[in-house]
Amino acid sequence: MLAYATLLHLKARFPDLLAIVAEWLSARTNQSWNARRVLDAAVWKYPLLEVRTALAHPQDRAVWSLQLNTRDTRVPGRDWRFELALRELKRGGVQATVAVRASDVRGPSRSAPLVPFSQPALVGALLERGDPDPETPGLVPLPLNREADAQVVAARITDPRRAHAVVVLCRGETALDVSALRTTVTGLADVVDLRPVLAFEIATTLKTVNAWPPPGRATVFPPRAAMVRPPELERRQVFGAEARTLISAVLRLSAPRVLAEHVTVERLQQASGPGASDGGDV
């Protein structure tokens, strides 16, 4: 089960991002890691934890991937796979893709705790110290204090080039931590928080693009610039304003783009294996 995914554009240098990963790995493994060691293509095994890395240089730009496999000590029979890929971009900066999956060895069980949806600590560190692009979806809250703010939201919703989702929610009496929701979907979606009572000009602008759900509800606008998009994803989808439901919806609608860009350790190993061309596309 896919429990988390995101795609980030970071302006920090590639070695600096590896240093952030090394610091995170040191805390996870209780071992000493540095950027040079992280870059090595190898496998490290620890109790209940395995680390795999791979590296390739297509078109003379580094593509590096990390895989962390762990056993969940709190939920018997549940395993986790954390994957991170860093790709140097021709225009500068680094594209980071993250995918986290959970699997229950015994199969789905009603008694097993639900798989949590939350932002991994490493993603938080990359956003804090990796100099993310300021246009990253969800990174900065979209205000709705005046008509110009509503026009910005409406333009973003209707932009045919929009490659991320937009969540417009009206909490009403619903208890919802919007800040935590925004953090979890950073990189995948903008989150717009409406008050039940809005100024006439703001409400009118939002109604024009069908972006004013009733109290306790939310509207999720799927990405419009997806490479492959089934017809049903063209439809606007309305959900209750509940965090798990909204995050699950954003993941389902936005993860295909992330996974299309994502490069796994196995894929890099195949690309850089015997007989593989160093200039191949990964």
Image (spheres, rainbow, N blue to C red):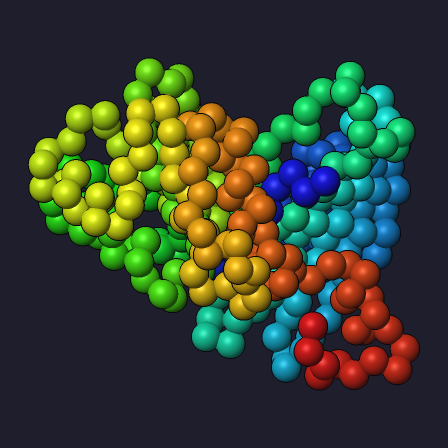
Query: Which quarter of the picture shows residue 275?
Result: bottom right
Reply above or below: 71 against 279.
above
x and y, in percent, of residue 30 in the image: 75, 32
Q: 277 or 46: which is nearer to us?
A: 277
x and y, in percent, of residue 218 in the image: 38, 34
Query: Which quarter of the picture shows residue 194?
Result: top left
Number of numbered tags placed on the structure image? 0
Q: Residue furthest left?
A: 200
Residue 125 appears in the picture as rendered: no
The answer to whether residue 47 is left or right of residue 9 is right
x and y, in percent, of residue 266 in the image: 81, 61
Query: Which quarter of the picture shows residue 72?
Result: top right
Q: Residue at x 85, y 31 (%)?
A: 107
> The N terminus is located in which quarter?
top right
x and y, in percent, of residue 192 in the image: 32, 39
The answer to whether residue 164 is left or right of residue 115 is left
> The C terminus is located in which quarter?
bottom right
Q: Residue at x 80, y 29 (%)?
A: 108
Q: 62 or 22: which is nearer to us?
A: 62
The answer to whether residue 82 is left or right of residue 129 is right
Q: 118 or 169: which is nearer to us?
A: 169
Reply above or below: 182 against 116.
below
The answer to whether residue 201 is left or right of residue 28 is left
Residue 242 appears in the picture as rendered: yes
Q: Residue at x 60, y 56 (%)?
A: 256
Q: Residue at x 15, y 31 (%)?
A: 198
